[in-house]
Amino acid sequence: MINFKKIKKSFIIAEIGINHEGKFLNAKKLIFEAKKSGADAVKFQVFKPHTLANKKLKKNKLQIESSKKKEDLYEMWKRVSLNEKELFKLRVFAKKINIFFICSVFDLESLNLVKKLNVDAYKIASSDITDYFLHSHISKQKKPVILSTGMANEREIKVAVKNIKNKNISILHCVSLYPCNIKFANLNRINALNKKFDLPVGYSDHCVGVNASIIAITMGAKIIEKHFTLNKKRVGLDHALSADSDDLKIICDFAIQYSLFKGKNSIEPTRYERSFQKFFRKGIYFKKDIKKNKKLDIHDLIVRRPKNNTPPKYYNKIINMIASKNFSKSESVNLNLLRKK
C-alpha cells in the first residue's frame, strides 16, 4: 500500500484524467507511456455524466476555448467516460506492468465501481472538497486518500480532512484553472499547507510545461500530479496543459535526481566520500635523507599527498625532535621513531 509519509522522493502521478477521449486503446497506451517515462502511478477520472452536468448545462469559457466540438457539457462528459469493463481491463494492465492505479471519484455510483477495481488510492477533486456526503463514504475505504485543495480556504480543508477520517491522507496544492497562468500558480502555498497541516503535501500542476512541477519538487512536494497526454497539440479540455512522454520523463528523472542530490540531513560525510580521504588528504614526509640522531627542522619535512599516519597537525610537534634511526627521502614520518632529546 502507498504510504506517502514514508516516500523518499516525490511520488509522480500521471493524471490521464479524460485525455483518453473515451477510447480504451488510448487509455491503455497512456498507461504504458506513463510507465515508460518513469511515473509511479496513473490516475483516471471515474464519473457518471449526470453527476457532473445536467443535459441543459452549458460549457464555461475555458471549456469552450479548449474543446471545439459542438456538444453540450453532458454530451462531452458522456463521450470521454470509460465503462466498467474497460476500467477493469486497464486496472489489470496497470498491475501487470507494475504501476499504481488511482482513481478520482465524483459520486457514489463511481465510488462503488472503483471499489471493485481494488485501486491503490482514491482521489478527491477540488470540486468535491465540500461534498461531505461523498467524504463519508470514502472514509469507510481502507485505502490512501489524496485530497486536492483548489478554491478551498483553510477551514474547508480542515473540515474535509476531519470528515474523511483517514490516517493515510495527503493534500495537494492546486489552482483550479485550466490551464493555470504562472502568475496564479502560487507555489508558496505548499509551504503554507506544510505549516498548517501535519500531512504529506503535494502539488496538482495545471500549468503549461514542466517548470511548476520541478519547482514544487524542490519545495518539498511529496506528490506531483501532472496531466498526461500522447499529444499536447490535440484539441480537448486538458491536452494543452498536459505533459507528453518527454515532459513526464523530465519530471520523473528530476524527482529521482533531486532526492539523490539532497542526501541526508547530516554534517558527516558519507562512508563512500570518507574512503577517498587517503588520496586527497596529506601527511608529513621526509624531504631528504635523514641521519640517525639528526635534530629535525623545517628543511627536513614536507607536507603532501597522500595521507599517511602522521597528519599535518603534528608538524610543529616534530620540529626539534631527534631521529632515532636513518630515514630515506620521501619516507613517511613515524612519530614512534622520533624522540624529544
Image (tube, rainbow, N blue to C red):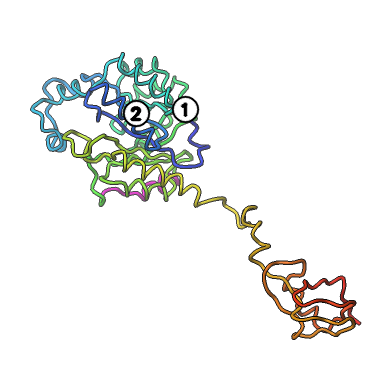
Residue 190 within the magenta-colored segment of the rendering: yes
Spot occupied by residue 133 in the image (x, y as percentages of width and height)? 34, 21
Q: Quadrant for residue 267, please give it.
A: bottom right
**Disc 2 or disc 1, which is closer to the eye?**
2
Which stretch appears magenta?
184-195
Q: Nearer the viewer, residue 316 or 156?
A: 316
- Rendered position, 124 above or below 241: above
Ranked by sequence position, the earlier of labels 2 and 1 is: 2
Q: Is residue 54 left or right of residue 219?
A: left
Can you name the residue that lies furthest to the right here? 341
Q: Is residue 289 left or right of residue 194?
A: right
Residue name at image x 14 percent, y 22 percent: 75
Spot occupied by residue 301 in the image (x, y as percentages of width and height)? 75, 80
Q: Which residue is mark 2?
A: 31
Q: Nearer the viewer, residue 218 or 271?
A: 271
Instruction: Inspect the image, locate mark 2, and give the three-letter code of the amino acid beneath it.
Output: Ile
